[in-house]
Amino acid sequence: MAEIKRNTNKIEISDGLLIPDRNENGLFSAWRISFFGALLILLGLIVFSPEPYFEIIKFIPDGLFNTFLVTISSIFFAMIIGLFTGLGRISRNPLINGIANIYVEVIRGIPLLVQLFYIYYALGKFIQVPSIIAAIIAMAVCYGAYIGEIFRAGIASISKGQMEAALSLGLSRPQAIRKIIIPQTLKVVLPPLGNEFIALLKDSSLVSILAVADILRRGREFASNSFQYFETYTLIALIYLVLTLFLSRMVGIMEERMKNAR
Amino acid sequence: MQDNIVVIKNAKKTFHVKSSDGSRKLLHAVNNVSLEIKKGEVVFVIGPSGSGKSTLLRCVNRLETLTSGEILVDNKSVTHPESDIREIREEVGMVFQQFNLFPHLTVLKNITLSPITVKKISREEAEKNAIALLKRVGLEEKKDAFPEELSGGQQQRVAIARSLAMNPKVMLFDEPTSALDPEMVKEVLDVMLDLAKEGMTMMIVSHEMGFARNAADTIILMDNGEIVEKGTPDQIFNNSTEERTRQFLKHVL
């Protein structure tokens, strides 16, 4: 069992890695170029060529709403599933442990698109649910497995001395997990969870295949009426890009804060 | 017999270890150890690394489970599978080499967590006790600090205060000064010495020979999972009868 040993009293000063630091590129970092580039092109198209771009923008907002609805609901349920899966994977109860392990193995082995079809169309044979509900269930179940892995790794990264200290103070295992292990795990898993959120936002475009009226679906509807495929999909790509770049920056800042808070 | 607070009878702890060539073998970390600790006694366990002293200590509050044998703390069996281990752990304080303070809690909350959660003491009372304990280890002004803001020696003193908050009958120390910078060792040893003077029963695994000589009532030398010799500091350091003891002391003193 490897254990990470932190020595808080040790001060390390060196010239650092030979790989260039992200921040060394200053004003012209890849992120700045992509983000502001995408934003400028997006605004430029809308302002200088309102026909058809402003038309498309007017057509899309409820799609944007659905995309956010699917993304946020899915990540919410996926996090709950993930937390229990992570706890299940470190459980000493062989039944719980087995269920959690099998869930992760099975779900990770099936493409998300197939899972979406499966829950909506295949299971639709037995229970019919609105497509947006099916989409949220499928995304939550799928991402629950990945987030479960993040939680498991997060819990494993907490030194085993923490559990031992809590147990020797008379706490029960569940108390120790709730009061000592989980609060520390949350801190560790926050940045990777942020990345999962971004990945989920992108993957939510898959739900358009179930006729959920997300951004992509609304774009498709516009394009098939107007035949302006190039313009529509350019705009949609730019919207996704601005959203994900913005969010990844937020995650980056959060990560930086966490590092400094340690 | 009544005044024995820790009784270890024929304790055996065996690990299955996988060696580098893939074969499994048995490692007898603790081999047939019997030991009695009286109330108020300060027992030092010394010996070369890998001799099983930490494992023996960790068996006393069942962080490791014995393979065979029995351990009693305050006449309650630690090793019986049906005994309430939490009840026993409340009475056995443990101080670790790596301190193991909870990094997400302030010093005060580190100390009050267990009294509030386990003993159901009110927050006010728990905090009052905690501040008194912090005063005792000389860290009253650090009550709102987080562990990472403290030096190693300060962290270890908080860890001792945290264990004391449960009013233990025995304190176990697992190499409490081994992870410290040399200039911080003394502040921790001073706290431990005070505890010993106040009559706390202590079982200490340590390499601080000078401290052992001053503070110990009994010193036990372990090697290969067995007790080689047991005696007062004077017997062990000056009049040892065992060749292995003299050989060990020659290397560490």
Image (cartoon, coloured by chain):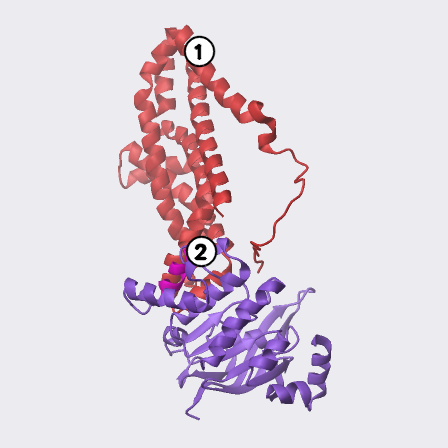
- Residue underneath mark 1: A44
Q: Main secondary structure of the magenta part?
A: helix
Q: Residue at x 43, y 63 (%)?
A: A92
**Disc 2 chain ID:** A
Please state which amino acid type lies under the numbered disc 1.
Gly
Where's residue B44, x and y in %? Answer: 57, 80
* A155, above or below B57, in the image: above
Element under disc 2: helix
How many circles with numbers are drawn on the protein? 2
Please state which amino acid type lies under the numbered disc 2.
Arg
Give the letter of the purple chain. Answer: B
Residue A122 occupies which quadrant of the picture?
top left
Give the letter of the red chain. Answer: A
First to last magenta residue range: B105-114
* A49, above or below A171, in the image: above
Judging depth in this view, the residue of B133 and A100 nearest the camera is B133
Q: Residue at x 59, y 79 (%)?
A: B212
Q: Residue at x 47, y 27 (%)?
A: A245
- Residue underneath mark 2: A89
Where's residue A5, x and y in %? Answer: 57, 57
Q: Could you tell whether B29 is left or right of B130 in the image?
A: right
Q: Could you tell whether A144 is left or right of A30 in the image?
A: left
Marks 1 and 2 sit apart, C-alpha to C-alpha, by: 50 Å
